[in-house]
Image (cartoon, coloured by chain):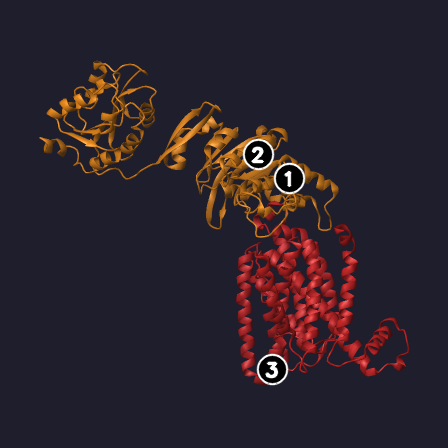
């Protein structure tokens, strides 16, 4: 029985994910008849049926708005969860998440500058705000890494502390920017709470290579991340080049995070909680933890985003939903398991 | 030079430390394949630092470490961990790994990024768990094992690395006696049967002396002694190392030197160094002899039978004594020597010693002495002469003040309150 489950686990999960994406695409604030929605999908994906019979408004909503948005949510959630697992691995710290090194603050500052300067022009399909957010995130990680480096080594404790320090400073700069540009305050606030509002196929195609290549790189570090949990000294003695591993995970995860954040804003909680929840079921081995975290993180964020855009007439930032649902659920699991992380 | 070629592991004038603080200051030693070496030294002398340096966690700041003919600094972590496996001092983890996962981590040096564990790897892990007797809990969580079981799992992981050199950092420090011996015997078996070279940092000198064929003693980051346990575990080395008084005797069972730690060397002598003579000869005066000596008093003793515990103590502490052969009766001639030895004593103590016809002569002539006389009360009760002790003490008491004490601490307290030498006789007159 158990073997059977194991054998069909991968196809089952894939079918499950497709089903989830399909269902969430059908749900939305605008009610579209079931048959119409299906016809749009069949037409667009398989080119079956006659396009004349389809309401162009439905095509626009299903194909150009909802589906890319759901896919982007899945990619972003999965990527953040995998990055969170990686960061928790190298830092050996349950508080670690993809934003711990200040990537989010850097991105937020970049985005604020973009918003304040009204960067409307697009660059390679990205809005100017997104470009600046990505640049801010990447510059931050480089800065934190430079500050923490002592000779050839990057001590984990220094890295964490300088990440927090740099993050706080950048947040302060962002606040200052907001104070002097009160007109842009709403927009900046909304951005920092994270949202997929207004995203489309361009954003999906932009994030996709980062997530695919990044996750493959992260998966190749799985065994060494396991050993890293025993402490750096022991990992060294077991043949892990800890400095190289740290660099690899740090930059890979930060690049993925920067790409995700630049299109979605700061979606909290997914990267922190999903790896913990998954670990409770899979155990600490990253080879199982990371793929499961990818799927669960993706599914979780898709569900949250569906709620965010469907429950009220005004869209709720998805970061609020992730925290509102993820927090209590996590506390419930902690209580139920009655053990530490 | 010939020796160096043969050696599997050699240190040449190695310096290392943390930042500006140099811990190892010129460590030189060479170890041959198949040796079982113990590194001993007190806390903070750099034993663990040496192992860290050897396993590539901290770099050398001077000198050179050579492993199997290659410079340690030129080895990558992967290369090194195929040659050298380390059993660390602590292995607390916050994550729930299975025992077999932990052992499989020992295969990491042989596996690339894309490699999956092969059946060959599983065979090696299986073998390692067989040797370390850990197979029965392979499917359990590492964190649910006892300290001794965990230690064996960590050793299994080290075996799975298939190293030529096994480094152990105080492998027994957290274990009870049963598991200490179990672990040491397992390491001995690995050394003997798998031809693994073992270098172990050990705190427990007796375990070190018992299992290691060679001991290297580290002090202030340098080697101060290197040789067989018999050559290294000698009194002056131990005193240098631990700054305390040690009793070293041959353990008849294992034919190895055995250390009995006595006391930390006291650098604060009594304010009034006196000449104290202790009449003893059983087993009850060991502690008071040691304490008097440590306070800096001039201690003499007699008449003691050779072989008694008090005699052994006098011998180890270098106390002047009048002694007679084991189980012989103390005669007047012996007591005369004893009286001569205590003639200028400021204080005389009749310690807690049972008196019989063989040693009752010890009490003769005490009334002629100048020093203050103290008697442990129990001598009256441990009297095997049929009341002879009380009669003699009463006779002495007629001519000389006798102070009775109920234990040796009371006596030491009395000695502490005595005036300085010279002033004593003046006041008593």
Chain B is shown in which shade? orange
What x and y, as percent, mark residue A216?
A: 72, 58
The chain under label 1 reads: B
The chain coloured red carries which letter? Answer: A
Q: Which residue is nearer to you in this view: A257 or B305?
A: B305
Q: Which residue is nearer to you in this view: A216 or A115?
A: A216
Give the residue at mark 2: B198
Depth-wise, is mark 3 or mark 2 nearer the camera? 3
Marks 1 and 2, how far apart at CA: 26 Å
- Kindly state the secondary structure of the residue where label 2 is placed: strand
Marks 3 and 2, how far apart at CA: 67 Å
What x and y, as percent, mark residue B157?
A: 62, 41
Q: Residue, x 60% and y 46% (percent of image)?
A: B142
Give the residue at mark 1: B136
The N terminus of chain B is located in which quarter?
A: top right
Q: Are marks 1 and 3 on the same chain?
A: no
Q: Are marks 3 and 2 in contact (CB under 8 Å)?
A: no
Whether residue B233 appears in this view of the structure is yes
User: How many other residues sit within 10 Å of disc 2, few (<14), some (14-19) or many (≥20)?
Assistant: many
Depth-wise, is mark 1 or mark 3 nearer the camera? 1
What x and y, as percent, mark residue B228?
A: 49, 27
The chain under label 2 reads: B
Res B188 quadrant in image: top right
Give the residue at mark 3: A186
Q: Residue, x 71% and y 51% (percent of image)?
A: B113
Q: Is residue B245 above or below residue A133?
A: above
Depth-wise, is mark 1 or mark 2 nearer the camera? 1
Res A314 quadrant in image: bottom right
In the drawing, does residue A305 fall left or right of residue B369?
Answer: right
- Kindly state the secondary structure of the residue where label 1 is placed: helix
In the drawing, does residue B404 fall left or right of residue B133?
Answer: left
> What residue occupies the far left of the structure in this picture?
B429
């Amino acid at each position: 029985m158990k073997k059977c489950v194991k054998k069909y686990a991968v196809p089952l999960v894939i079918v499950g994910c497709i089903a989830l994406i399909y269902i969430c695409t059908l749900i939305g604030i605008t009610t579209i008849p079931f048959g119409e929605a299906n016809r749009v999908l069949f037409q667009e994906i398989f080119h079956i049926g006659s396009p004349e019979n389809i309401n162009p408004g439905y095509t626009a909503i299903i194909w150009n708005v909802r589906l890319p948005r759901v896919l982007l949510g899945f990619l972003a959630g999965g990527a953040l969860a995998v990055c969170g697992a990686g960061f928790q691995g190298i830092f050996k710290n349950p508080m670690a998440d993809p934003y711990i090194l200040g990537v989010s603050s850097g991105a937020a500052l970049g985005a604020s500058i973009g918003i304040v300067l009204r960067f409307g022009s697009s660059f390679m399909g990205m809005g100017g705000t997104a470009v600046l957010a990505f640049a801010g995130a990447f510059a931050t990680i480089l800065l934190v890494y430079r500050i923490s480096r002592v000779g050839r080594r990057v001590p984990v404790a220094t890295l964490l502390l300088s990440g927090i320090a740099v993050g706080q400073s950048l947040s302060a700069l962002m606040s200052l920017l907001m104070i002097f540009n009160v007109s842009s305050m709403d927009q900046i606030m909304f951005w920092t709470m994270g949202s997929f509002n207004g995203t489309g196929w361009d954003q999906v195609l932009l994030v996709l290579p980062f997530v695919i290549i990044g996750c493959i790189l992260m998966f190749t570090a799985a065994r060494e991340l396991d050993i890293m949990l025993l402490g750096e000294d022991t990992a060294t003695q077991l043949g892990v080049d800890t400095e190289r591993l740290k660099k690899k995970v740090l930059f890979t995860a930060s690049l993925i995070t920067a790409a995700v954040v630049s299109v979605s804003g700061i979606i909290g909680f997914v990267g922190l909680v999903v790896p913990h929840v998954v670990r409770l079921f899979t155990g600490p081995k990253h080879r199982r933890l990371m793929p499961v975290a990818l799927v669960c993180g993706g599914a979780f964020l898709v569900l949250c985003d569906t709620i965010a855009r469907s429950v009220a007439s005004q869209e709720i930032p998805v970061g609020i939903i992730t925290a509102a649902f993820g927090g209590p659920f996590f506390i419930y699991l902690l209580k139920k398991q009655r053990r530490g992380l | 030079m010939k020796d160096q070629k043969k050696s599997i592991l050699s240190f040449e004038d190695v310096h290392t430390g943390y930042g500006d603080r140099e811990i190892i200051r010129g460590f030189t030693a060479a170890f041959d394949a198949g040796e079982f070496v113990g590194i001993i030294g007190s806390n903070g002398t750099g034993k663990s630092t040496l192992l860290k340096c050897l396993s590539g966690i901290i770099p050398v700041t001077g000198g050179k470490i050579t492993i199997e003919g290659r410079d340690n600094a030129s080895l990558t972590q992967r290369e090194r961990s195929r040659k050298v496996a380390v059993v660390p001092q602590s292995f607390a983890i916050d994550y729930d790994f299975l025992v077999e996962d932990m052992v499989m981590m020992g295969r990491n040096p042989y596996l690339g990024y894309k490699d999956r564990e092969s059946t060959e790897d599983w065979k090696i892990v299986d073998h390692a768990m067989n040797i370390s007797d850990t197979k029965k809990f392979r499917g359990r969580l590492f964190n649910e094992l006892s300290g001794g079981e965990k230690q064996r799992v960590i050793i299994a992981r080290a075996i799975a690395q298939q190293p030529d050199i096994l480094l152990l950092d105080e492998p027994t420090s957290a274990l009870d006696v049963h598991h200490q011996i179990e672990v040491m015997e397992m390491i001995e078996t690995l050394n003997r049967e798998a031809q693994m070279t073992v270098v172990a940092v050990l705190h427990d000198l007796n375990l070190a002396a018992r299992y290691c064929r060679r001991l290297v003693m580290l002090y202030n980051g340098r080697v101060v002694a290197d040789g067989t346990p018999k050559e290294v575990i000698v009194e002056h080395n131990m005193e240098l190392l631990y700054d305390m008084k040690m009793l070293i005797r041959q353990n008849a069972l294992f034919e190895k030197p055995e250390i009995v730690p006595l006391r930390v060397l006291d650098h604060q002598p009594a304010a009034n160094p006196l000449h104290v003579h202790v009449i003893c000869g059983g087993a009850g005066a060991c502690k008071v002899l040691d304490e008097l000596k440590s306070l800096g008093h001039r201690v003499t003793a007699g008449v003691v039978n050779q072989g008694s515990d008090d005699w052994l103590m006098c011998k180890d502490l270098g106390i002047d004594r009048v002694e007679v052969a084991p189980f012989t009766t103390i005669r007047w001639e012996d007591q005369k020597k004893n009286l001569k030895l205590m003639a200028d004593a400021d204080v005389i103590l009749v310690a807690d010693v049972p008196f019989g016809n063989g040693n009752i002569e010890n009490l003769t002539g005490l009334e002629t002495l100048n020093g203050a006389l103290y008697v442990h009360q129990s001598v009256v009760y441990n009297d095997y002469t049929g009341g002879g002790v009380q009669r003699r003490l009463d006779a002495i008491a007629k001519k000389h003040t006798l102070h009775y004490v109920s234990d040796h601490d009371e006596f030491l307290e009395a000695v502490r309150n005595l005036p300085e030498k010279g002033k004593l006789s003046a006041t008593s007159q």
